[in-house]
Amino acid sequence: MDDVLEKIDKALADVDSFQEACMRVVSILRREVPHFNWVGIYLKEGDELRLAAWDGPQATQHVRIPIGQGICGLAARTEETVIVDDVNADPRYLACFPETKSEIVVPIFGRSGVIGEIDIDSDTRAAFTAADQALLERVAELLGRLAA
Ligand code: SME
C-alpha cells in the first residue's frame, strides 16, 4: 500500500489545479488496487456533494447527493470514514451499480472541516480492510492539504 501512496504523492507534486489532483487520484487508485472497482471524489457545495472526478466502468447517476442521503451523505455529516460490508443489507445505501457489494467513503478535511470525500465501490463483499482505510485516509490528507 505504501507504493500506492508514493505514486499518488509523486503525481500530486506537479498538478495545476485541485480538479487535476482529484482526477489523478481516482485514476491511480483504480489502476493500482484490484478491488477498487469504481472510484469517485465528491466535493461539498453547500448542502450537497458534487461528483468532481471518477474512474470506473460506468458513470453514476448520483452526480449530486444531498448531505443527508446515502453512505456518502452519512460520511460527510458524521465526518468519519464509513465502511459498508454488504450494501444490499444497508437501507442508507444509494444504489449505483448492480455489481457493487461493498463501499468505503472517506472524508477529505480542509481548514474548515469536511470539503469532500473519496467514495469507492467494490464488486466483492466486505472488500475493504483496515489497510485500505489507512491508505485512503492518507490520500485524503494529501488532498486536503492541497485544497487548503
Ligand atoms: N452509493 C453511494 C452513492 C454514490 S455511488 O456509490 C457512486 C451512497 O450510498 O451514498
Image (tube, rainbow, N blue to C red):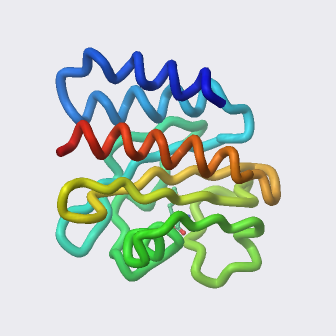
Answer above or below: position of 76 versus 145: below
- At 68% from the left edge and 68% from the top edge, which residue is drawn? 84
Q: Position of residue 79 (x, y in %)?
A: 40, 70
Q: Quadrant of the C terminus?
A: top left
Q: Please identify the quarter of the rendering in which residue 17 is found.
A: top left
- At 33% from the left edge and 63% from the top edge, which residue is drawn? 64
State the residue in front, 131 or 115: 131
Answer above or below: position of 48 versus 38: below
State the residue in front, 52 or 22: 22
Q: Please identify the quarter of the rendering in which residue 91 is found.
A: bottom right
Answer above or below: position of 98 versus 137: below
Q: Quadrant of the N terminus?
A: top right
The reply, left or right, for residue 38 in relation to residue 76 is: right
Q: Position of residue 18 (x, y in %)?
A: 23, 35
Q: Position of residue 118 (x, y in %)?
A: 46, 50
Q: Position of residue 108 (x, y in %)?
A: 36, 54
The reply, left or right, for residue 4 in relation to residue 46 is: right
- At 53% from the left edge and 59% from the top edge, which residue is drawn? 105
- At 61% from the left edge and 27% from the top edge, which residue is drawn? 2
State the residue in front, 56 or 1: 1
Residue furthest right as drawn: 125
Q: How many marks?
A: 0
